Every structure is written in C-alpha cells, then in structure tokens.
Image (cartoon, rainbow, N blue to C red):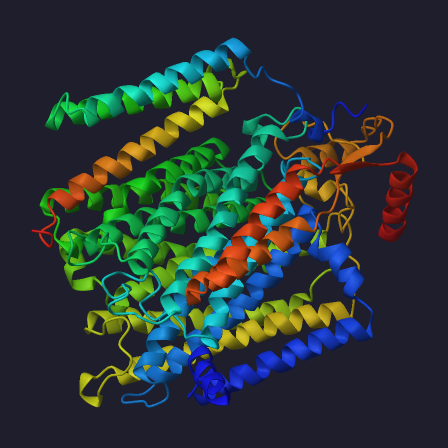
Amino acid sequence: MWDSIKKFASEFFVTGDPLIYGADVSIGLTMIAVVAALTYFKKWNWLWTEWLTTVDHKKIGIMYIIASILMLFRGGVDALLMRTQLAVPNMDFLSPEHYNAIFTTHGVIMILFMAMPFMFGLFNLVVPLQIGARDVAFPFLNSLSFWLFFMGAMLFNISFVIGGSPDAGWLSYPPLSEKMFSSGVGQDFYIWGIQISGIGSLMTGINFIVTILKMRAPGMKLMKMPMFSWSVLSSCITIILAFPILTITLALLFIDRYLGAHFFTLDGGGNPMMYINLIWMWGHPEVYIIVLPAFGVFSEIVATFSRKRLFGYKSMVFALMSISAFSFFTWAHHFFTMGSGADVNAFFALTTMAIAIPTGVKVFNWLFTMFRGKISFETPMLWAIAFIPCFVVGGMTGVLLSVAPADFQFHNSYFLIAHFHQVIIGGVVFGFFAGLYYWWPKVFGFTLNEKIGKWAFWFWNAGFYICFMPQYVLGLMGMTRRVNTYGWDTGWWELNFVSTIGAFLMGIGFLFQIWQILHSIKFMQKAPADPWNGRTLEWSIPSPAPMYNFATIPHVEERDAWWEEKQRRAQGEAPKPLPPLEPIHMPKNSGIPIIKSAFWFAAGFGLVFNWLWLAIPGFIGIALSMLAHSFNYDTDYYIPVDEIERTEAAAKGDAR
Amino acid sequence: MAQHTAHDNHDSHESHGSLKSYVIGFVLSLVLTIIPLVVVLNDMVEGTAAMVVLLVTAVLQFVVQLIFFMHLREEQKPRWNLMALILGIFILLTIVIGSIWIMTYNTVAH
C-alpha cells in the first residue's frame, strides 16, 4: 500500500529539481497564508459575495488584471531563468529538458494567460464606461468567461508541479507533440488549459461585439464612438473568427493523442504540416487581436495628453477594421520554409507587406495628433511615446522577415525572436501598461505615484533595448531559437551576456511597478473624477465609478462628448438639466460561473490523467450548472432612486 | 419605466416565426437529409456525382437552417447578423481554399 502510494506520488508530482521543490514550498506557504488571512479577518463571505460571484464588469476587469499580473510574474520568471541559462556559454543552470519546458510555458503564458486577460481586463474596465452603458450585454456570460479563463490558466500552471510541464514549444507542433514523442501529461495540460480558457475568450468576443453594437448611449453613432471602443470591436471580430480554428486544431491533436487518430502523424495518412497551417490561421490573427486594443489605448492617450482631437478619426477606424479582416490573409508567412512553392510564398509575402500599410497610417495619425498639441508627459503618455519608435522598428524588421527568400535565413533565428518580442512588448505590453496607468484612477479611485512610475518606465525601456537589440545581431550571427546552450567558439557570449542584463533590468522595472502600486495604496491619494482632463464619457462620472456607472444615461451628440461638454461649460453655457432619476435595472450576482468553471477544471484534469472517474462527473457537473442557470428566473433587480441619490451625493462629497 | 436603459434593449422582441414556418423548415431539412442518405447508401450515383449531391444538399440544408430557424430574413436594420454571416463565410472560404492551395504544393507532403 505504502509503496504504491509512493510510486503514484513520484509520477504525479514533479520531482528531482531543486527549483521545483522551491516552487512547491512557496506555493504551499502562499496558499496557507491566503486561507489563514481570509479566515482570520473573516473575509470568506466578503470574497464570495463581492468578488467570486460578481457580474459587475468593473470587478471582473479588476480580477482579469490581477490574474494577468500574476501570470506576467510567472512568465517573467521563466524568461529570467532562460536568460540566466544563456548568459554564458556551457552554462549548467537548467537541464535541456527543463529548458524546453520553460520556453514552452513562457510563450503560452505570456500570450494566452498574460496578454489576453490583460486585454480582456481593459475591455471590461473601460468599454461600458466609454459608451455610456451600465454593464456589458451579457453580464452572466462575462463572469463565466473570466472563470473559464482562470480555471484554464490554473490547469496549465499546475503542470509544473504536478505531472510535468508541456515542452514541445508554445504552439506544440506535431509530430513532437504527438503521443509517440511526448508521452507525458504535459501536452494534455497544454491542450485542456488552452481549450477551457479558449471558450472564455470566444464568449468575451461575442459579449463585447454585442455590447458595442447594441448598448451605446443614445446619440452615439458608430462614427462618434471613442477609438478604444472601435479597437475593441475590431479585435473581437477577429476573436470570434479566429478562436474556433484554434479550438478545432487542438481538438484534432487531442483526438490524435487520446484516441490514436492520424490527423497530424507521419503515418496513417496524416500530415503534421496541416497542423502548422491550421494553428497559424489562429496564431497570426491572434497577434492582431492583442495589438489592436493597444492601438486603441494609444489613440485615447495621445489625444488626451496632446489636448487635441485625434487626427484622422476615419482613417483610424478604417485601418483598425481592415487589419481585423486582412489579418486572416497572412498566416503562411510563419512557414515560408515549409516549401509550398514560389506562388504561395509570393502571395503571403505580399499580403504581409500590405498589412503594414494600415499600421503605418496609424503611426502617422498619432504623430499628427501630437503635432502642435499641448503635450504633457505623465506616465501613460510616456509609455505611448516610447511605443512609437519601438513599434516602428519592430514593424520594419517584420517587413524584412516577410521577404520570403530572405526569410530562409532569418527563420527561427534570434532575429525572429527579437522581432516578435519588439512588437509584442513594444506594442502590446507597453500599450496595456499605458492603458492601466491611464484608467487606474477611474477604476480604483486613487492615483498612482508618478515618480516611481517613471523609474519603472525607464527601467523597462532601457532593459528592453539592452535585452533585444543584441538578439537581432545574434540571429544574424546564426544563433537559433530554443538552443539551451552554446560553446565559447561561437562568439555569441558577449551579446548574450548583455541581453541577459537587459532582461534583468526589465525585471527591476516590474518590481518598481509593484512597489508603485503598494506605495500608492499606503499613501492613498484620492483621484478626482477627471484627473487627466479626459475627452470621453468615462471621465464624466465619479472615480471609482459607482456600481451602476451612470446615474442617468448620457445623450451624446459628437465625438469626444465629455470634452465638448467641458468646453461648453467653460464658455458659460449652463449644463443641460438632467432628467429625473429612475430606478436602475441591474443584473444579480451568480455563483454558477465559478462552480461551472470548477467542474470544467475537474473534467480537464481528469482527461489529462485519463481518469474518467473524475472527467465524467466533471462533465455532468457542467451540464447540471447549465440546467440550473436555465431555470433561474431571478436574475435581475432594481436599484431604488433614493439609493442612487445617496451614492451620488457620497461621490460628490468625496470629490470635494 | 426605464425604457431608455440599455438593459431593456435586448428584451425588445423581434419576430420569432410562426408554426407554419417551423413546420416547413423541419420538413425541408428532413427531405434534404433523406436525399443524400438514399442516394449514397443505395449507390445510385458514384464518385464526383455523389460528392456533388452531398455538397449541394448540405449547402441547401445550411440555407434552410438560416432562413427558417435563424430568422435571417426577419432581422431589423442594421442587419448585423447578415453582415456577420457574410464575413464568416468569407473567412471560411479563405481557410478552406487557402489550406488546399498551401497543402497541394507542399513539397514536404509529396
């Protein structure tokens, strides 16, 4: 009996690596500390009613952001471990197997569990406020999306202490990811972690399309909508068309592994290249999915901090929407070297170069918005300004990569690594940080310390260039991606060493950001309703926004509605009399999303280990949760007028 | 009360069809299911002709579903569902035709 338990435990838990044991201990201690703190401060009930069951888009947004910052920490530690291993030749810090696992989880976590939830967090925090709505179109679904993402991310993350991490690269190409070459459970954690959170992503896409199309304030025609909301619309359209492709591709891979099918095997009529073709049909639109909202954030910030209307509104809308469609026509540039012939490669090289055009249009729009504006350099604007040169260089190296014949040299070299980190860090991460800094006062009701924020900004920026500029050169010198070590004779070590220094500087930048948040919580500075002299509707309501957002739904007559209203008031025009308050219709909290997602977690975990005794009850639980929700008619309530009056008066009192 | 609130917007009722339209749709979809089954199982046609029968009945089935059950014709303007459908079909064709094109000339597969 004891022996069989020991045998099970030795396979079930990841053993043998001191780093993993360290992680085990810290995970255990953190969980004990969290449970103890919640019990000691009697916060369990508060946690459940205020957060875990909430359908309020603002709270869901905050949970998304917290989860994504935790994931940024984990993905960042992965990155620092890799850079430490590569700092000097013949380093013996990580074993080759461990290195494979770490570059795989770094990629998956950063794209799917850091960038995506960060983006969804910003959608949730901002879009309803910006379009003058009281919540998203489907608040219950929104909560379900979050919990599915969360459970999927947790399922993926526990793989590094239980069962073993996936180690076939972030897109897990077959045949390596097939059962024959990856027989462990890591690959199944990969499939189910991504599948479960993928359902959540798809539902968020649907939710925000409907929210934007159906729930804008009266008078806000589409062409009067703030640019961030436009970027969310374009990103969501791409989500609902691209994510099903990912789901199907991973389902086919799962059928290969679980039922012994031959979709992507080398024998039995399968073709691994079909997987690569399919996964990039999702993978290429995915990078536009995450970068388009960042473009929206920059559009808002550049206009606000230049005190000018956004230059070229219509061309910006056209650029966003055309990118969301054209992003589906460039996927083959990820595998020019597959050998599909000159016609295919020429076509996809051209489409790839063409899609740079709308992006270029946007860069000029931002520059012309700043031109002759009254620019001020608060932290959100600093990130926006740093983004432009960084993204332009990243985009240009992308165009170099799109030249199909030259790509045979660049393919899978560090040149490529440097390119996509430059567009994803310089575009997406800078964009989301800028957005978080910009909307922070509105969301949390207090301001962040500018001085520490500037330190964080400079560490991140200097670190970025010190880390990735040497990698372009290393790529041209022949260093390929995913090598876990190299010899002294290659001549690569000086540049690698510099690159590692840069990575740690970015890590210090991250620590500054955490310090900035903690410092600002300790020395709480109440935020005014409109701290940046903003232009759009979210700045017309108190900070933090009351739970119903708008006491009376605004009527919009032009772009930058709040800015125009402020101009009119400054000219001495009396503000329009507000209609009398009416009871506000709101959705009720529900525990079903988190319970249903927990069943998904159980089902996923059961399928990973092929434990049908766990997977089948998991799926039954999912079905029962759906039924329970279908028969629940008690889903909404009204906030009475006197409560609205009290809330508004309290918010006004705070502001003074 | 609260007619202007956004939450009431999605409660506004659009037409959801009549019994007659549902019966017609159901019968048509049954017929379109039976035709390919009978034709293929009884070996009435073979090869390319069988493929054509399968594909044509499948596409017609899709149209029946859209018109009778998804109420595509009854949507009020702006016709978001129709636009989404056209964009979806466009992307779908890209996926299918693009994959065939790429994989046909794939030198690894040959």
Left or right, A509 with reference to A78? right
User: Residue A577: where, in percent of width, then height?
Assistant: 85, 26
Q: Measuring 41% from the left and 37% from the top, which residue is drawn there?
A: A319
Residue A256 against residue A17 in the figure, above or below: above
From this viewpoint, which residue is outermost toward the left? Answer: B110
User: Residue A584: where, in percent of width, then height?
Assistant: 80, 34
Is A280 in front, or is B60? B60
User: Residue A656: where, in percent of width, then height?
Assistant: 88, 51
Left or right, A419 with reference to A606? left
Is A302 in front, or is A435? A435
Let me know if residue A383 appears in the view.
no
Q: Measuring 36% from the left and 66% from the top, which residue is drawn there?
A: A187
- Quadrant of the rendered image containing residue A510: bottom right
Left or right, A622 with reference to B83? right
Q: Measuring 36% from the left and 77% from the top, which residue is drawn there?
A: A499
- Quadrant of the rendered image containing residue A627: top right
Left or right, A124 with reference to A336? right
Is A353 in front, or is A6? A6
Let me know if residue A277 appears in the view.
yes
Residue A228 against residue A65 in the figure, above or below: above
**If the image is split into quadrants, where does the N terminus of chain B sit?**
top right
Residue A377 against residue A300 in the figure, above or below: below
Is A572 in front, or is A248? A248
- Count of marks, rendered view: 0
Residue B70 against residue A613 in the figure, above or below: above
Q: Measuring 32% from the left and 80% from the top, which residue is drawn there?
A: A97
User: Residue A515: where, in percent of width, then height?
Assistant: 65, 74
